Image (cartoon, rainbow, N blue to C red):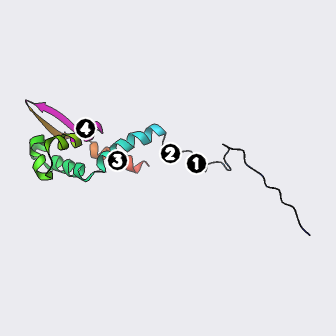
């Protein structure tokens, strides 16, 4: 005895089941976090962040950041700009030099971004 089977097709664009939970993060939340995580994902930027964080007085001149990384000033400035744009570092121009310091609470904010995933 052969039982015939019918194949039920799900219309295109229709999910086969309901999601088990609503998304924890919106697309905007994810985009905001990605900027910070991308800034931290580069080894040179992590070193720069560490150098600035541990610098005497909590700030470092861009002129003092090229030698430890063995990178040119334009490359170091590029990395620093990414971290400023991500809200990790603050930039203050003094004469021809720029000084960088850690944004107050930035590392706590990063911790919070990871914990809220």
Residues tagged 2 and 4 counted as in contact (Cβ below 8 A) = no
Residue 32 shown left or right of residue 75 in the figure: right
Label 2 sits on residue: 24
N-terminal label among 1 and 3: 1
Camera-nearest label, 4 or 1: 4
Q: Which mark is residue 21?
A: 1
User: Is 76 in front, or is 108?
Assistant: 76
Residue 37 position within the rendered picture, expressed as x and y whole percent measured from the top left: 34, 47
Q: Give the structural element (helix, strand or loop) at label 1.
A: loop
Residue at the disc numbered 3: 37
Mark 1 and mark 2 in contact (Cβ < 8 Å)? yes
Q: CA distance from mark 2 to mark 1?
A: 8 Å
How crowded pointer 1 is (Cα within 10 Å; few <14, some 14-19, many 20+) is rated as few
Tell me the residue at 13%/52% (across/down): 70
* Residue 94, above or below 26: above
- For residue 25, side relative to residue 18 (left or right): left
Q: Which residue is mark 4?
A: 84
Q: Is residue 104 above or below residue 45?
A: above
Residue 42 appears at what percent x and percent y?
28, 51
Q: Position of residue 34 (x, y in %)?
A: 38, 44
- Which of discs 2 and 3 lies nearer the camera? The answer is 3
Task: Mark 4 or mark 1: name the one nearer the start of the chain.
Answer: 1
């Amino acid at each position: 005895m052969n039982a015939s089977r019918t194949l039920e097709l799900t219309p295109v664009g229709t999910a086969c089941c309901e999601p088990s939970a609503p998304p924890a993060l919106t697309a905007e939340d994810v985009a905001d976090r990605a900027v910070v995580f991308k800034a931290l994902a580069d080894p040179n930027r992590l070193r720069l962040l560490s150098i600035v964080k541990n610098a005497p007085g909590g700030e470092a001149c861009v002129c003092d950041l090229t030698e430890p990384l063995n990178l040119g000033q334009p490359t170091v400035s590029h990395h620093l700009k990414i971290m400023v744009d991500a809200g990790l570092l603050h930039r203050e121009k003094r004469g021809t030099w720029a000084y960088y310091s850690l944004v107050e609470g930035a590392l706590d904010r990063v911790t919070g971004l990871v914990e809220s995933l």
